[in-house]
Amino acid sequence: MASWAREMTPEDADMTSRGGMQGRPRAAPIARRHAPVAPAVPSEDALLPVIAGARARGMADAFESLGVAAVMLDRAGMALHASSHTARFVGSAAGKGLTMAANTLICANPVANRALQAAVAEIVGGEEAGNRRIIDAESGVAMIVKPVPGAESDRYQLLKALIILETFV
């Protein structure tokens, strides 16, 4: 027997038997104390952000796996996510003249920046817009702004547009 264990004495046995618990109320077994409750089913509105977020995360994971430098934009034209591959193009270390400020992609070249911001505004503004290709010849970067199909009618879609970054040769 372990050093911390001791044998049960008659007094211990008396306390654990029915008779030894006289005067103290006995707790009902757990199954009787807590009636089974059916799990609450979340409403569609409660699930909306979860489903939309999962879809956006799935797209982000796909861009990562494919090695695509992409910036995902929401309905306001703000960046929701930028793939890790955008580091080749964005930031001072990349030296391409692209920065991310206040969740907005900005070009150092004023002409390219105006074209980029106009393309994003057009697509996010709800107008029927196709792909827009902005080329910054100074940095050698091409930015393709693409609308996400069906974003207006799909309640489960957070994304409105994508900006794909690639090297222009």
Image: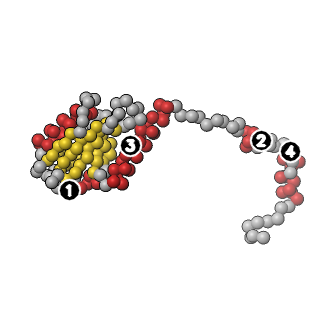
Q: What's under tag 2, amino acid-wise?
A: Ala
Q: Nearer the viewer, residue 94 or 55?
A: 55
Q: Are marks 3 and 4 in contact (CB under 8 Å)?
A: no
Q: Earlier in the sequence, mark 2 or mark 4?
A: 4
- At x 48% / y 35%, what residue is drawn? 47
The residue beneath circle 1 is 94
| Disc 3: which residue | 56
Residue 37's image quarter?
top right
Q: CA distance from mark 3 to mark 1?
A: 26 Å
Q: Position of residue 163 (x, y in %)?
A: 26, 44
Q: CA distance from mark 3 to mark 2?
A: 49 Å
Q: Are marks 1 and 4 in contact (CB under 8 Å)?
A: no
> Does 35 appear above or below 63?
above
Disc 4: which residue? 22
Q: Which residue is more in the foreground, 26 or 41?
A: 41
Comes first in the chain, label 1 or label 4: 4
For mark 1, give the secondary structure: loop
Give the residue pinned by disc 2. Answer: 28
